[in-house]
Image: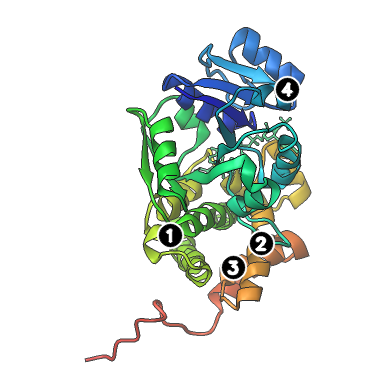
Amino acid sequence: MSKVAVLGSGSWGTALSIVLADNGHDVRLWGRSQKQAEEINQHHYNNQYLTDVKLPSSIVAYTDLEASLHDADTILLVVPTKAMRDVLGELRNYLDRPLPFIHASKGIEPGTHFRISEIIEEEVPQHLRSSVAVISGPSHAEEVALRQPTTITSSSLNPEAAKYVQDLFMTNHFRVYTNPDLIGVEIGGALKNIIAIGAGMTNGLGFGDNAKAALMTRGLAEIARLGLKLGASPLTFAGLSGLGDLIVTCTSVHSRNWRAGNMLGKGKSIDEVLNEMGMVVEGIRTTKAAYELAKKEKVEMPITNVLYDVLFHDKSTKEAVSELMGRVKKHEVEDLKIDPL
Ligand SMILES: NC(=O)C1=CN([C@@H]2O[C@H](COP(=O)(O)OP(=O)(O)OC[C@H]3O[C@@H](n4cnc5c(N)ncnc54)[C@H](OP(=O)(O)O)[C@@H]3O)[C@@H](O)[C@H]2O)C=CC1
Ligand SMILES: O=C(CO)COP(=O)(O)O
């Protein structure tokens, strides 16, 4: 059995801690809030992030990062993307041995356009990490915490590391596949959040299922277009970390990205939305990163581009829809220009 330091005690870190504890692992769940740590250690609840879910008593909460890492043999990072560098920067001061790093966060960093595995590689010296892996797929914390059937993918450039993650998490209600396409898995997980904001927005504007299906399908096309340019396999985008996660995030009331988009579609400002959410909406920052990356790579991403203007340049949501619907005529599948019979 492993001793896992889970860094990030929000909804997803807590839900994954339940999976690990159910599998018999020792979990040290690190977060910033003393009040929350006391609630977990004394009463076995994290009600701020997972209301009314009783946690296994083998989950021990920490606010001292060094103490949480003391005898850990595995690190699971689950903080929002914007906090990743700060946490890694502190963590590396407390390690004196190489450990496997796993992350479960979904984002791309604006400016550098790094995926999270790349941020880990930059922040943690090689002699302190034995491998880097990601776990990603259609998995709302609220359902995982209730032990409802969930499937997910683990990926690493090191096949043994992906298998280690599979063994670490796999239970009879949490099924883990492996996929060697690290770029595709991380890009799919991060970019589906942009499309989910758009899907929520169409709902807020009063549109129905046709608009949602259109955004999801054309959204997947542009995610795959960028992913392929970056070296991902096209098949990954049809898998759990691509289409699977896109479906769950664009159609579930649990999705914070969908809910944020829905509020924007109803006319709320971005500041009002963020104040009301109280949880991370990764798609906002990732929209900026993907917008920049698409420009740099010269990849056409029309949905990302209009959402960038809505989120960062006050374009109205109605204008965004007209702009998308009024684009020049296109082939649906760029490479498939079959001559008519
Ligand atoms: N929720 C889900 O269903 C899923 C989420 N994810 C991904 O997991 C990642 C985490 O999301 P999630 O747990 O849902 O987010 P939540 O909003 O539920 O919680 C965020 C957590 O991050 C902590 N945090 C915020 N800023 C910092 C910081 N600077 N340093 C340390 N800790 C910080 C918060 O602490 P505090 O309370 O002190 O502010 C809180 O514990 C995201 O990348 C998300 O996309 C992936 C799959 C599913
Ligand atoms: O990634 C998720 C589900 O797989 C969670 O999505 P949200 O961050 O939109 O809630």
Residue carrying label 3: 321
Can you give x and y, in whole percent of width and height, for residue 299 in the image? 57, 76
Q: Which residue is mark 4?
A: 63
Residue under label 1, please give it.
213
Q: Disc 3 or 2, which lies upstream in sequence?
A: 2
**Going by the image, does 179 lie left or right of 304?**
left
Q: CA distance from mark 3 to mark 2?
A: 27 Å
Q: Residue at the location (41% across, 54% down)?
A: 180
Q: Specify the quadrant that holds the N terminus.
A: top left
Residue 340 to residue 247: above or below: below
User: Where is 120 relative to 223, above or below?
Assistant: above
Tell me whether the residue at label 1 lies in contact with that at label 3, contact meaning CB atoms closer than 8 angstroms.
no
Quadrant for the C terminus in the image: bottom left
- Which amino acid type is shown beneath numbered disc 3? Val
Residue 4 locus on image (x, y percent): 55, 27
Tell us which disc is closer to us: 3 or 2.
2
98 or 192: which is nearer to us?
Answer: 98
Neighbour tally class for label 3: few under 14, some 14-19, many 20 plus, Cα within 10 Å: some
On screen, residue 77 above or below 116: above
Q: Is residue 329 above or below residue 25?
A: below
> Residue at (61%, 9%) from the top-left corner?
43
Q: Is mark 2 within 8 Å of ligand 1?
A: no
In the drawing, what numbered circle is on residue 113? 2
